[in-house]
Image (cartoon, rainbow, N blue to C red):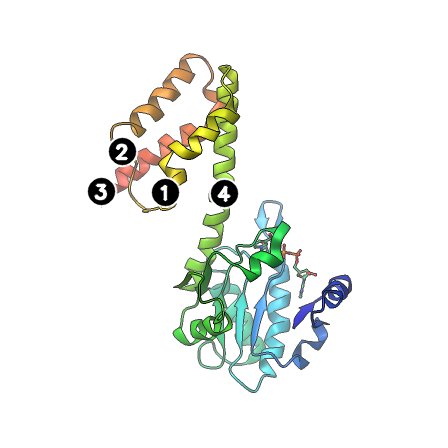
Amino acid sequence: MFVDVSSERIQLLRQRGHEAVPVDQLSNAGCDVFLVSVPTPTVRGEVDLAVVRHATAAVGQAMAASAGWPVFVLRSTVPPGTTEELVIPILERVTGGSTARDFGVCMNPEFLRAASAEQDFLAPRVIVVGGNDQRSRDALIGVYASWNDVPLIEMNLRTAEGTKYVANLFNAAKISFFNEMGRVLRAFGADPDVAFAAVVYGAEGLWNPTYGTRWGTPFGGMCLPKDASGFLGFLTAMGMEEMVPMLKATITVNEETAKEYSAA
Ligand SMILES: NC(=O)c1ccc[n+]([C@@H]2O[C@H](COP(=O)([O-])OP(=O)(O)OC[C@H]3O[C@@H](n4cnc5c(N)ncnc54)[C@H](O)[C@@H]3O)[C@@H](O)[C@H]2O)c1
C-alpha cells in the first residue's frame, strides 16, 4: 500500500496496479511497518528536513492508532543523528509511547537509481538495516525475507544514515576525480577516454571493490605518495596546479590521516 500527498502520484501508482491512498487515509491503511521515503532537498546549502518532519508526524498518528507494535522505517537520505534527534522525538510526542517499548524505528537507506527505481527496489544490491534495537531490526528483516540472496547488513541508526552519504559522495568524488584528470590529460594532448578505458583494468581501486575502504589508514608504499606529490610538483612547475584541487586535497587528507595514524 502506497501513501502520498500528491494526487497525481496516487493516480500513477493506481494506474500501475498498486494500492495507493492520500495521507489522510493513512490510519485506515492497516499497516504495521511504515516505509517513509520523502524528499530531503538541499535548500540554501542545508538539508531541508521539513517534509521528513511532516511525514513523521502523520505516520506517528497512524502508529498511535495501531493495535500492534508498529515500526517506522526511514528511507530518505538524512544526515547522521536525524532519526534519533528529530524522528524519534516526534514519534514519541505524537504517539505518547516510547521507542523500542511501544514501537520500532529503523533507518533503511535506498540505493536505487532514479532512472530504474522500481527494478532497483525489486533487485537491490544490498539491504542496509539500521536500528538501535534488535526487535526493530528483526521486524524490517522480516519485510525483506524473500530477498534472501541479497547481502543484508545490520547496523545502528547513525551508521545507516552515514552509509548512504558515503555511497553517494564516493560516486560524486569518483566522477569529479576523472573530470579533473581528464582536463589535465587533455592539456597534455593525451586522450582521457582511451586512458580511462585502460585505468578501469589497471587501477586496483576499480577492480577490487574493498580497496581503500579500511578506514584510518593512510596510503603509503612505493608509488602512491611519490606519484601524488611528484605529479602535483610537475603541474605546479608548469603553472597548472589550479587544475587539480582534488589531487591537492588527496595529499592533504593523507598527511592528516598519517599524523592521526601515528598518534593512535
Ligand atoms: N531519486 C533517487 O534516485 C533516490 C535514490 C536513493 C535515495 N533517494 C532519497 O529518497 C528520498 C526520496 O527521494 P525521491 O527522489 O523518491 O523524492 P520524490 O520527490 O520523488 O518524492 C517522493 C514522494 O514523496 C511524496 N511526498 C512529499 N511529501 C510527502 C508527505 N508529507 N507525506 C507523504 N508523501 C509525501 C511526494 O509526493 C513523492 O511522491 C530522498 O531523501 C532522496 O534523497 C532518492
As shown in the figure, which amino acid type bears the numbered disc 2? Gly
Q: Residue at x 46, y 43 (%)?
A: 170
SS assignment at label 1? loop
Q: Quadrant of residue 61?
A: bottom right
Q: Which mark is residue 208?
A: 1
**Front disc: 4 or 3:** 4
Q: Residue at x 25, y 28 (%)?
A: 222
Q: Are marks 1 and 3 in contact (CB under 8 Å)?
A: no
Query: Circle 2 is placed at which residue position?
Result: 220
Q: Are marks 4 and 2 in contact (CB under 8 Å)?
A: no
Q: Which mark is residue 171?
A: 4
Q: Quadrant of residue 118?
A: bottom right
Q: Nearer the viewer, residue 246 or 53?
A: 246
Query: Circle 3 is placed at which residue position?
Result: 263
Q: Are marks 4 and 1 in contact (CB under 8 Å)?
A: no
View quadrant of ligand 1: bottom right
**Front disc: 3 or 2:** 2
In space, the residues marked 1 and 2 are separated at their CA atoms by 18 Å
Q: Are marks 1 and 2 in contact (CB under 8 Å)?
A: no
In space, the residues marked 3 and 2 are separated at their CA atoms by 16 Å
